Image (cartoon, helix red, strand yellow):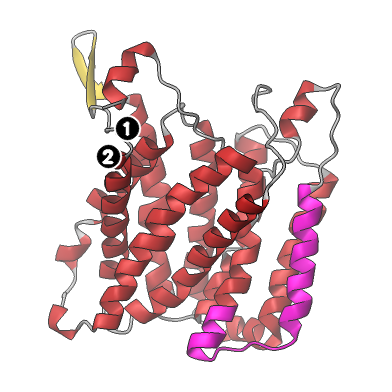
Amino acid sequence: MSSNLKSPKEATPFDWVLLTLIVAFGGSAFVMIRSALETIPPPIVAAGRIWVGAALLYILMRAAGRRLPPFFSRAHGHWHIRRSWRWMIAVGAVGNVIPFFIFPWAQQYVESGLAGIYMAFMPIWTVALAYFFAGENLSGRKIIGFGLGFLGVIILMGPEVISGALSSDFRAQLALLLATLLYAASAVLSRRAPPIRPRIFAAGMMIVAAVMATPAFFLVNLDADQWSLTSILSVVGLGVFPTGLNGVIIIMLIRRAGAGFMALSNYITPVWAVAMGALIYHERLDLSAIVALTIILIGVAISQRSPFDRKSKNDTALAGEIAGEIKPMVEKTTPAETDQTKS
């Protein structure tokens, strides 16, 4: 990991508000997916949310006075895809297209709360991937924090849901594990990506994902006359909140308080997912949730309290980070790119 990374500033109350929004939007996705699946085929749910998110992010990018770079560039007499687009294609496919298709399919066979628990695997996958592929170090404090967070999620689900996991479709659960692995991989890819303006990166990545998802509209029987208004609004909600707005808020929070702070949402999101499942679909929720929430928050606090050695630049760069965090995509461009990325 580069030693020139600056440690994030101490989180402010506004940063906690942003984190709460990320958790609320992300945790609500599982309930909205379940609602959408009542009358809309899973591939259409996935493709629809991606297109809604892409449209919203493009509008936000243009409203900020920015535009996408050219897709092709010419060097030494040959045309090739620009480096920035190659990264946006990779992250769009790995972090959006495949996972977004997996979750609606899998939630036909598992409860929304059980789908939420699998999101707790993402930080664990990320720790391993970042250690082997991003050169990030692990500390005992981080490991303990992650361990407590995962334990809290297991307690939150309780014996009934855990036993339900044993009886639920094994393929669906493996698919959910794969989806969280891909989310983690996209985080590492995002960390390795070159500096690209955040709004441009988010919009370009989602537009690429939308194009990749388009064949889904032609590969299934639409039966659009069977779609309920509730399901349609759920797809729109998926595109606007956990797909579109969350992308912007995540970038804001990364730049304000650091990606490590933002990553805490991966352990808090299952709490929200279970609460929403209990409120709307009367899924299991009892006092054990309080114990689980307490353990999760303790793990969150421990993971945020990193040793800080002012004498070491490397320790300074690592302070306050969680392994696998996404490197902030600072708004920097080379002189040659400025005219292509600014309107």
Mark 2 is surrounded, within 10 Å at the Cα level, by few (under 14), some (14 to 19) or many (20 or more) other residues, namely some
Q: Disc 2 on helix, strand or loop?
A: helix
Q: Earlier in the sequence, mark 1 or mark 2?
A: 2
Left or right: residue 132 compared with residue 99: right
The furthest residue to the bottom: 282
Asked if one can make out residue 5 in the rendered structure from this viewpoint, the answer is: yes
Q: Nearer the viewer, mark 1 or mark 2?
A: 2
Against 11, residue 295 (above or below) is below
Residue 233, image x, y percentages: 29, 74
Against 253, residue 124 (above or below) is below
Magenta segment: does it hold 312?
A: no
Quadrant where the image shows the C terminus: top left
Amino acid type of the residue tagged 2 in the rendering? Arg
Residue drawn 76% across and 41% down? 138
Residue 269's image quarter?
A: bottom right
Span shown in magenta? 275-304
Residue 188, image x, y percentages: 54, 40
Q: Which residue is mark 2?
A: 62
Q: Nearer the viewer, residue 8 or 325?
A: 8
Residue 46, image x, y percentages: 32, 64
Left or right: residue 2 compared with residue 220: right
Left or right: residue 292 compared with residue 343: right
Residue drawn 76% across and 25% down? 314
Residue 326's image quarter?
A: top right
Residue 253, image x, y percentages: 56, 46
Magenta stretch mostly in which secondary structure?
Answer: helix
Q: Nearer the viewer, residue 282 or 58?
A: 58
Q: Which residue is mark 1?
A: 85
Asked if one can make out residue 125 in the rendered structure from this viewpoint, the answer is: no
Amino acid type of the residue tagged 1 in the rendering? Trp
Magenta segment: does it hold 281?
A: yes
Residue drawn 51% across and 44% down? 252
